Amino acid sequence: MAQPKTAQKDAYTLILDAIDSGIYRPGDRLVESELAERFGVSRTPIREALQRLETQSLLARDGRSLIVASLDHNQMAELYAVRTELEGLAARLAARHATEEEVRVLRDMVDEDRQLMNDPAALARANRRFHKMIHLASHNRFLVQQLDLVHRSMALMGATSLAAQGRGEIAMAEHQAIVDAIARRDEDAAYKALKDHISVAFVTRLKLETRDV
């Protein structure tokens, strides 16, 4: 008897998606049996997925338990430093290599995402899709792989910076500037626009992190 499509999915991807979507947040304990029941897969692939996630530092040990890892201030700064450079490079290469169809998709994304201003969670998902499209438009598979790793670690930061008051509107204007530069084939402008966008997001996140301290 064939398994349901959801059960056929890779256990690693299922757990990673759950962390990325906020089902499991930094500090949450992951129990092998509970994960197997939730996702409808056997415990062996769950165990292997947990080991892989621990190796990638997305999970951490708390005694004998595995919990979703969290990032301290220095780790967050290090991650943003790497992300800023890689994202900027992706925008530069997209300005050089993106097809007209890819540019059109990016424009459509910006237009559609403006309708999500009052839904930070939906806007965060749309934001990830937008950045992924730029990564793909760079037409550099090795860069895409590295950015995938970076974005997995971004899930460990918890709440999106797009939840900050007024950040959504500003981010959409920044997205528009990035797409305009890519469409003009202006590599330097695309690089700068995306780096500036990530820098503003980092400042916003730092303010969120210290708001309740």
Image (cartoon, helix red, strand yellow):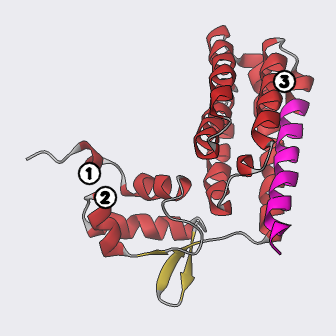
Q: Please, what secondary structure does the residue beneath circle 2 have?
A: helix
Tell me, yes or no, whether the two marked residues, 3 and 1, touch with CB atoms within 8 Å: no
How many numbered circles does the render carry?
3
> Main SS type for the magenta part?
helix
**Picture layout, residue 112 above or below residue 51:** above
Q: Residue at x 83, y 35 (%)?
A: 170
**Picture layout, residue 79 above or below residue 99:** below
User: Relative to the observer, which residue lies in front, 55 or 9?
Assistant: 9
**Residue range highlighted in magenta:** 192-213
Residue matched to label 3: 177
The kind of residue tagged 1 is: Ala
Q: Please, what secondary structure does the residue beneath circle 1 have?
A: helix
Give the mark nearer the N terminus: 3 vs 1: 1
Residue matched to label 2: 39
Give the mark nearer the N terminus: 3 vs 2: 2
Residue matched to label 1: 7
